[in-house]
Amino acid sequence: MKGLKFRRSFRVPLIFGIFSVLWIMFSDKLAFAMAPDLESAGFYSMVKGLIYVVLATTLIFLLLRKDESHKDQLMNEIAAVQRSFNLLFEDNPQAMWIYDNNSLDIMAVNSAATKVYGYTPDEFRKLKITDLRREEDIPAMLKVITDYKDELRQSGPWEHLKKDGESIFVKVISHPLRSLGLDSTLVSVIDLTEHQKTLNELDTAMQERDDFESFGYTASHDLKAPIRAILGYSDLLAKEYNKMLNAEGNGFVQQIHQAGLTMNEMLDDMLTLTGISRKPLDYERVNLSEIVLESMNTLKQQDPERVLNFTIQPDMTLIADKGVTRLIAQNLLQNAWKYTKKTANALIEVGCQENAEGEKIYFVRDNGMGFDQSSAEQIFEPFTKVHKNGTYEGMGIGLSIVRRAVEHHDGRVWVEAEPGKGACFYFTFQQKVADTEK
């Protein structure tokens, strides 16, 4: 019958017995049929017996050899399974152990777990899984174990205790193992301690940044009043009391007034910088080309005698906050305008290109003074100037506003530059759906 299998201790005798019966039934008849007389029949019977011994011995050898072959194959399979188990368990860089579901005793543990928890393998195997928990957490853990119905279980975060009493926070992934009559569970532990530490540090940094921005915004706003007073009184001194002061005194008044104007401009920039992240974005479809043209026309009106070649790619659109996008365009164009002032045949180019991933990248390129590429990151820091000879006006905060505005859109901004050959500022926004299109 197909699929019917016998144990080796029964299979070999059965085959041998069937062979012997068939031999006796047919070989005797064949020998007597071939023998012409009784003496020849005896000789044929002896030859038949010898043939039987040879065939029977060969049959037994082949049967045993076949069983040995199956045994070798089985042992090879067991060895392969053992190697796989060692790779997945013993050599796994993740802490793992196996525990008995009834007694909660830890039955096996890998080397990664001993390193994480500080126990030797022998010490680990003397523990129960409850020994790795705080006493107050054990009831919750037992309830989770009891309530789980799925084959693959995930739980956490849990607080585990190391041998030295130090706490680590982990996520536990477990899977039931039922073999050889054992009811056990394989546990894999993911250490969340460093992850949690990083999150805490990030939360702290974000809180400190928010506090700093709040303070900066409040301080900048509150300082506007005394600066207005300084400007007002210095202007009054210049107009009403200039005859009472000598040339040197009037020069001091002029310097006070100019310093007040500079301080007022710095406060305006600070309010803009700190206000970007505080203001929620209002996404809409924005025509960047129109915004750039408006900003460039404003710059030309401030210096109508300036000769400059300006090119712009038409109909560039993006989904963004219109007001914040205008800040980006204004500051990038002002930067290009400023650093091409002494360049013959000055050129400013604004356009858009796509990278291999289909991401739209907008750029503002100029052929102005440029700078060393090693300052590419530093240039986006507040109050940082690459050119420190005082020739170029500005607070050194415009590019900081650009970076903050772009990052507020979950985008990226970077620059490529070379001394004497200009600079190209790139930025890209994360693709969004306009609020009006939702």
Image (spheres, rainbow, N blue to C red):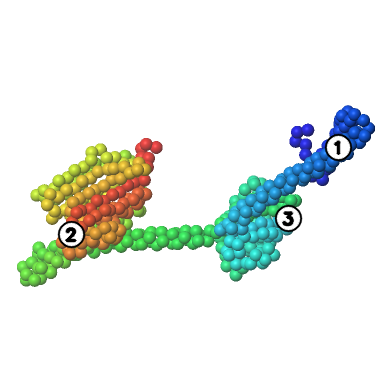
Q: Earlier in the sequence, mark 2 or mark 1?
A: 1
Across and down, in percent, residue 290 comes to: 23, 41
What is the distance, in whole Å, between disc 2 and disc 3 at their CAs? 78 Å
Camera-side mark, 1 or 3: 1
Q: Earlier in the sequence, mark 1 or mark 3?
A: 1
Name the kind of residue labelled 1 in the image.
Answer: Lys
Q: Dividing the image into 4 quarters, which one contains the C terminus? A: top left
Residue drawn at 24 percent across, 48 percent down: 364
Residue that numbered label 2 is attached to: 393
- Label 1 SS: helix
Camera-side mark, 2 or 1: 1
| Label 3: how many Cα within 10 Å (few below 14, some 14–19, many 20+) | few
CB within 8 Å, label 2 to label 1 = no
Across and down, in percent, residue 319 comes to: 33, 42
What is the distance, in whole Å, between disc 2 and disc 1 at their CAs? 120 Å
Residue that numbered label 3 is attached to: 102
Left or right relative to 123: residue 396: left
Camera-side residue of 217 and 17: 17
Camera-side residue of 349 and 237: 349
- Label 2 SS: loop
